Amino acid sequence: MQRDFQFYIVPTPIGNMSDISYRTVEVLKDVDIIACEDTRTTQNILNHYNISTKTISYHKYNEQSRVEFFLDLIKEGKKIALVSDAGTPMICDPGSVLLKSLRENNVSVTSLPGACAVTTFLSQVPREDETFIFVGFFPKTSQKAEDLLSKYFDTNLVFYESPNRILDTLDLIKKIRGNVCVALGRELTKLFEEIIVDDVENVIEHYKTGIKGEIVCMVYPNNKSDDFDIKSKILNLKQKGFKSKEISTILSTLYNLNKNDVYKLTM
């Protein structure tokens, strides 16, 4: 017999409908309300497993207004499950506002283990160590993207990206980090699942005609850290308004480098 909680955080399949646990089905049948991003998407899963529990929308546009509503239901003795459209709630999905209020009101909360695109992806790609940084969706502004790529040049950098932006993102990675190794996974657990690990130039070439599906990507640390460190310093100085000639003078003086070599790196 399992302990009863008032609020359940419940993962749903990220692609393959069979990737769901017995406990997940039991909990979704047992609770009184299922809070979901899109009731239509969740209903497909519920229909597949003959679950008739009532659903109610909970997404980033109404999460604040739903808090009191859910707290009132819980005070009435109702049990609630939170699901996202796919994967584990709270991982790039709404829920933080609600969870904070539940904790403040001493509501008993538990989370079920289950599908998550990040861990599914990382379990298929080789890494020298267990360290990685997950940043959610890749920044849309070039400045924030450049800052991110420069900041984590020595760590496995993992992010989500949309198929219509991934080629531009890979081009930016090449510009900032050089021909660094990347891993890209798409359509995880689905029929056309694909994982590719290669230099970013080759990955760009592989997908030059287009790419479809949900994407998880990882940028490996740069092998030539000294060389990239100079490039990082160049980028930082450019962001502060220094010109190429000024940058080459500054860095060659500070680090005993060839001025012409540094100047070439600024171009």
Image (cartoon, rainbow, N blue to C red):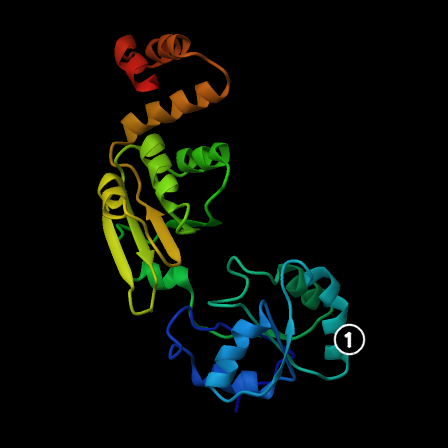
- Residue 121: percent from the left, percent from the top? 34, 60
SS assignment at label 1: helix
Q: Which residue is mark 1?
A: 72
Using the image as rendered, state which of residue 129 and residue 219 is in the foreground: 219
Above or below, 22 relative to 147: below
Where does residue 51 sit, x and y in percent of width and height?
54, 87
Asked whether the viewer can see residue 125, the reply is no
Is residue 180 among the parts visible in the rendering?
A: yes
Q: Is residue 235 above or below residue 57?
A: above
Residue at horizontal 35 percent and vertical 51 percent from the top: 217
User: Is 116 placed left or right of 36 in the picture?
Assistant: left
Left or right of residue 173, residue 36 in this image:
right
Image coordinates of residue 144 in percent, x first then y, are 50, 35
User: In which quadrant of the rendered view does residue 69 lie?
Assistant: bottom right
Residue at 47% x, 86% y: name it: 49
Residue for point 61% across, 63% down: 95
Of the residues shown, which amino acid type is indicated by label 1?
A: Asp
Within-10-Å neighbours for mark 1: few <14, some 14–19, many 20+:
few
The answer to which quarter of the image holds residue 234 is top left
Answer above or below: position of 260 versus 57.
above
Q: Position of residue 154 (x, y in %)?
A: 34, 38
Q: Quadrant of the C terminus?
A: top left
